[in-house]
Image (cartoon, rainbow, N blue to C red):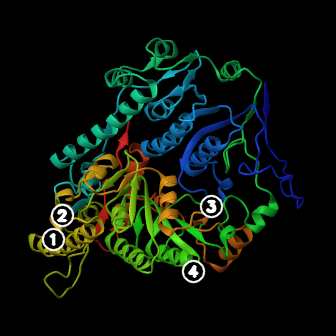
Amino acid sequence: MKRTLLTSLILVGSLVAPIAAQSPTATKLPDGMVPVITVDGSVSEQNNPLDFFAPATQTLRDLTDAVQKATADPNVDALLVRLESPGWSLAQAGEFRDALMEFRATGKPLVVSADMLNLSSYYVASAGTRIALPEVGGLDLYGMSLSLYYVRDLLAKIGVVADGINTGKFKDAMDPFLRQEMSEGTREQYSLLMNDLFEEVIDAVAAGRGIGKDKAEEILTKGPYSTGDALEIGAIDEATGLDDLMDLVEEDLGKTVTYDWEYVGGKSKTAEAPSLMSLLMGSVGKSAKAGAGKDQIALVYALGPIVDGRADNSNPFTKTRSIASEDFLDLLDEAVEDGNTKALVLRVDSPGGSAIASDRIWTRLARLREKGIPIVVSMGSVAASGGYYISMGADKIFAEPTTLTGSIGVVGGKFTLGGTYEKVGIARQRLSRGAHSDIYGETDVWSAKEKEVLGVLLDDIYDTFTAKAATGRGKTQDEIKALGGGRVWSGKSALANGLVDELGGLSDAIATARELAKAPEAALVEYPKELSLIETIEKLMSGQISMSVSQSTALSGNPLFQTASLLLPPRQLAHLAFMVTAMRDRPTAMLVMPAIPEFD
């Protein structure tokens, strides 16, 4: 048995270009080759070519592309997938699993190795023809739960009082700050949502393991299990480590094979470091320049909360992602400016945000469609509220069964600091003219009349939201309103209710875009484009890249955040940071879902 490491050498700080490894897409594998696809750590949507300043990440597209390449390659005899504590959402795991199931359909062995498997990883592993764990390992399976965190009383301890209004029973983005328990609407929608997600995992495990749904549910809820127990109940196939497992694969195939450990494109823990020349010239990863002058399909990433104006997403030294309206509109212009773009694929992973920014992006996308450019949306882990708003006018929408989407509704709110000022000895004195002159003031909650006025504004935005959704989805406005009110749907239920068109991942969306554009050979070009190191330095020196601290860092001196950061999970803290920051200067209408639940 041979293990081949396709690595290259790099002399750090030297101007000598390293020996480049062969590109995975250009490698012709000999007979007896088994690719190894390792999923280790955080799985991101889009790669930052300069993210060697931070811990390495893998992109979901790199992983699925590698599986699809193995599926199409006749020289591949089997596929080995190694799961090393992946950090991914259930939707990302499902998209990767879909690709694995396509490989499994070839009839070739699909072997999955891990030390420990949790729910999302076992969901993926169930696609394998053989699952192996070492003797000292196990299955961390004990069902599914989700948590939302409420901080009204925490706010009260420092004198902060939140106030908010919304357009529906389910629009609960402000609830974490207004309540200390789930509302009836929240409990109802998330109970049904969790049912959908758990049923998807049960169905997948039952199909993958060739067992009944009752047996699959029992496996998923009766743990945790040791490796021995997992083997006894038929949840896995082998109690063996990785080295012995590879020997077993060779025995099954009846020949010696070479394991290719660098089959996945992009960076991984064993991948070669980029050369100095590639950094200077911008040739790391999938360069957008590759499609210059030819027909192209533009793949545009819309990742993070939706905000007004501009952001510092181009800063390569931070991991902060947001969809800033001005930046994103520029990005769309860039994607179509040379006239070669025949279709646009929008990859959306966003819980929403500013209503104004969402509408501006929707409008620009509508104008592109009017110019004859088909638009296909691929929803990632979440495409809800504003994330759904920018998606709903597309020619076709794809979602994973476990995508969180919908949340058609509007919310407005503010955080009042009158109690905080009193605690610390600040007196606010102001002169004003007009009955509602203090409607955005930071010291007092809204009066009944002020809420009435703001409610009319939010209702108007909600009517616009639902009217445009009705047009985009071929429904009446009343039908959309029956699905709205802020309610969050799984991708599976969204399909059943006509909010999306098909279940599928990014590869399906790209294939459909090529069909709609009648451009099967068009190059796929990613946006935002990759910056070379020289371009990055030039933008940094000219001030086009901001080195400002991130939102969470800027708020770190706030006593609320000092306390919350010690107690709240990252997603809940990020939601708190986003809402406080968005409403700090002037409360605004928000198309945003509550913090993405923490699934346990």
Q: Secondary structure at mark 2?
A: loop
Residue at 64% in and 38% down: 37
Residue 181 visible here: no
**Which callout, 4 or 3, points to the residue nearer the camera?**
4
**x then y, percent, for residue 275:** 80, 57
Q: Which residue is mark 3?
A: 317
**x then y, percent, for residue 290:** 69, 67
Res 455 label: 1
Residue 153 visible here: yes
**Which callout, 4 or 2, points to the residue nearer the camera?**
4
Circles 2, 3 touching at the beta carbon (< 8 Å): no
How far apart, in angstroms, are the residues tagged by discs 1 and 4? 43 Å
Circles 2, 1 touching at the beta carbon (< 8 Å): no
**Which callout, 1 or 3, points to the residue nearer the camera?**
1
Please, what is the three-letter code of the amino acid marked with disc 1? Gly
**x then y, percent, for residue 299:** 54, 64
Quarter the C terminus occupies:
top left
| Residue ranking furthest to the bottom | 433
Q: Secondary structure at mark 4?
A: loop
| Of 594 and 256, the residue lying toward us | 256
Q: Looking at the image, tell me whether mark 2 or mark 3 is earlier in sequence order.
A: 2
How far apart, in angstroms, are the residues tagged by discs 2 and 1? 8 Å
Residue at 67% in and 42% down: 73
Res 245 label: none
Res 339 label: 4
How far apart, in angstroms, are the residues tagged by discs 4 and 2? 41 Å
How far apart, in angstroms, are the residues tagged by discs 4 and 3? 32 Å
Q: Looking at the image, tell me whether mark 1 or mark 3 is earlier in sequence order.
A: 3
